[in-house]
Image (cartoon, coloured by chain):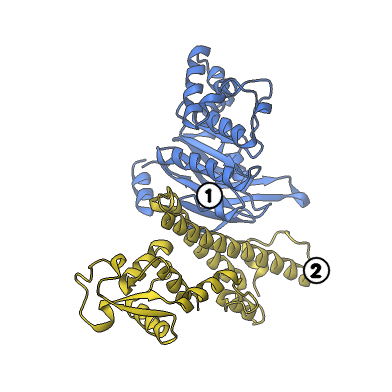
Chain colours: A yellow, B blue
Amino acid sequence: MSIRQAMLAILEQGPMYGYQLRAEFEQRTGETWPLNIGQVYTTLTRLERDGLVEVVVGDAGSGNAGHGGVGEPLGSDRTHVYRATEAGRSEVSEWFATPVPRSQPPRDELAIKLAIAVTLPGVDVGTIIQRQRTATMASLQDYTRLKRTGRAATPQEPADLAWSLVLDALVFDAEAEVRWLDHCEARLRRAAAEREGVRPGASTPSTEGATR
Amino acid sequence: MNAVLHLAAVSRVHGEGATEVHALRSVTFRAHPGELVAVMGPSGSGKSTLLTLAGGLDAPTSGSVRIEGHDLATLDNAGRARIRRTSVGYVFQDFNLIPALTAAENVALPRELDGEKSRIARRLAVTALEEVGIADLVDRFPDEMSGGQQQRVAIARAIVGERRLILADEPTGALDTDTGEEILRLLRARCDAGAAGVMVTHEARHAAWADRVVFLRDGVVVDETGSDEPEVLLVEEAGR
């Protein structure tokens, strides 16, 4: 799971409190994949169990961690400062050295939805496609607005550049989805036209050609 | 706020009888000051027809086209030509610059055709070229410029003299990704400064720069993102 490795990789910068770790993560990725603080501590606890991080109890020697904790609720792990161990560092190197596998694509709800829809009578696939395209387009507009305004538009720091690249990833992803929907629409219209033995693009209006 | 461009129930039929093609079917469409609207659709969906009608380069079979309140059908040829030169700027995929003219001359041409003294027209042209970031290329000829630079000249030509309606037909089509994005940034800036923009594109990533995206299929608007602010329309209708 990449959050675990991402957190470990950020810890290579130096020892940190859990909430600092979260701030560093969000600095680079915006609010795209929000981390709740509980999740951060659970992950840190597991990393510690696996010997990949160690606790540097909030004493000296961890100058990098500051004297913070101001306003932080009391509780044992919230006052801990964590540091990557040697094993943790090699896990990070391993992560960077290994491509993210595509062999098991994440579940794509939209692809599944359309795959089911085209096989069912009485489902208006054309309308499903159009609604989805409008919704995806609206998200694409949102990402583009974020890209051309705010800190991603004129990156000052590496973390700003990171965030603008994450936005680009979202943009390309949404764009690919719109293209795929266009493609599905065209394929379905052609299939419908062939079934009815009529010339594609003849007088049937709007999306009815793709409707079943 | 009144629409700069208002198409009301516009239809356009090409040919007749068996070869009749309905390029647009009763399309209503507005572009307001400060707004960039993208029109998306596959080829044959009517998007180019929409742009041609919006620019007064063709007339609808039925319905009306108004630019800044002027119904194009009530104007004679000279009147339409004047609106085209003074209110509407065009940006094309292939730039459409005149090869024998320099950047400044290309941009100044519409002003000169409109009777502006050539010295003033040139000054306006240089200002427009500055605005699109190529003040240093004013005396270059099109074949001495890159595609992106030529498209900047075309945009300068489209905005020279404060024209309020910018019509762009696949303006990024012939450009690489980064250059295309720069062109969108310019169009966007012009609309943010108060112009109304209509851009036809088949690229979702580029359409996403618009405030509103309208989807055309078979000559019909099938959907759009955002809305055309109904309260604005009410005020507009009440004002007539």
Q: Which residue is mark 1?
A: B38
Residue appearing at x 50%, y 79% in the figure: A1
**Kind of residue at disc 2:** Gly
Residue sitting farthest toward the front: A61
User: Image quadrant of residue A4?
Assistant: bottom left
Q: Nearer the viewer, residue B73 or A193?
A: A193
Mark number, residue A197: 2
Q: Nearer the viewer, residue A24 or B40?
A: A24
- Give the alpha-carbon distance from disc 2 to disc 1, as whole Å: 34 Å
**Kind of residue at disc 1:** Ala
Callout 2 crowding tier (Cα within 10 Å): few <14, some 14–19, many ≥20: few
Position of residue B50 measured from the top left corner of the image (x, y, whole percent): 59, 45
Position of residue A168 measured from the top left corner of the image (x, y, whole percent): 52, 58
Residue sitting farthest toward the bottom: A49
Q: Chain of mark 2?
A: A
SS category of the residue bearing label 1? strand
In the shown orientation, is residue B8 left or right of residue A206? Answer: left
Q: Chain of mark 1?
A: B
Mark 2 or mark 1, whichever is nearer to me: 1
Residue B124 position (above or below residue B41): above
SS category of the residue bearing label 2? loop
